[in-house]
Image (cartoon, rainbow, N blue to C red):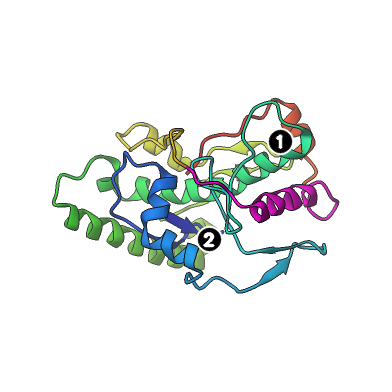
Amino acid sequence: MAACDHNYKFTVVDVGAYGSNSDGGVLSRSEFGKALHNGNLNLPKGEANLPGSRTRTPCFFVGDEAFQLTQNVMRPYPGRNLNVKKKIFNYRLSRARRVIENTFGILVSRWRILRKSITLHPENVDKIILATICLHNFLKTVNDLRPAEHRIYCPPNFVDTEQEDGTIISGGWRSECSTSNVVEIERIRAINARRSTTLAYKQRDEIADYLLTPEGEVLWQYEYINRGFNSPDFH
């Protein structure tokens, strides 16, 4: 269970859960999830305005359908026959989630021990994973201080890039990982989600409304969903 920033560096990590558990279940039982639920995760307090608007929301993480909708975790609208507002929200949410997918992609492509099951004592496995994450963050920081042509750990085009029309160009890590036994990023559908709060539903709707305004939209989003966009499965 992990979160990252826009520079593909991990900001919160909680290891030790079995891979067969759903993300939603792992979050609720993890120290990360407990701290988030209890308000002890050191997130900025109160609410902030969405850029260029008067709409105010708490700080939140983005997740997929495996997670419970809360004021601090936004997940997609469920279902297939959605209106334009909900389709655009789901597209923009998946676009944001692509950052964590690429962060994991860089990690696994550079640290090959993560490409298959590690047959060691669970305690040692946890230490190995945490060590690779610390090294990843360090090397990514050093990498970003160098001119683009001298970046080795994460060179240009190693992560997904977005064209002006919203088309995604796959990053180089995908071709490296596709030929190995990397653990697949799976969709987890069978979950036991608790009832989301009315405030969380209201917050999601307000964000969805904001994404339709001149301040919140990206120019290609309407064309993109009309191409038949179907929210991909990201972790």
19 or 30: which is nearer to us? 30
Q: Secondary structure at mark 1?
A: helix
Query: Within 10 angstroms of label 1, few (less than 14), some, or many (20 or more) residues?
Result: many
Q: CA distance from mark 2 to mark 1?
A: 25 Å
Please provide the residue range marked out in magenta.
Answer: 193-217
Residue 87's label in the rendered image is 1
Q: Is residue 132 left or right of residue 77?
A: left
Report x, y in % for residue 95: 62, 44
Above or below residue 83? Residue 129 is below
Report x, y in % for residue 100: 50, 50
Residue ID at (44%, 46%): 24
Residue named by callout 2: 5
Q: Amino acid at mark 2?
A: Asp
**Displayed quadrant of residue 170:** top right
Q: Amino acid at mark 1?
A: Lys
Q: Is residue 229 left or right of residue 215?
A: left
193 or 109: which is nearer to us? 193
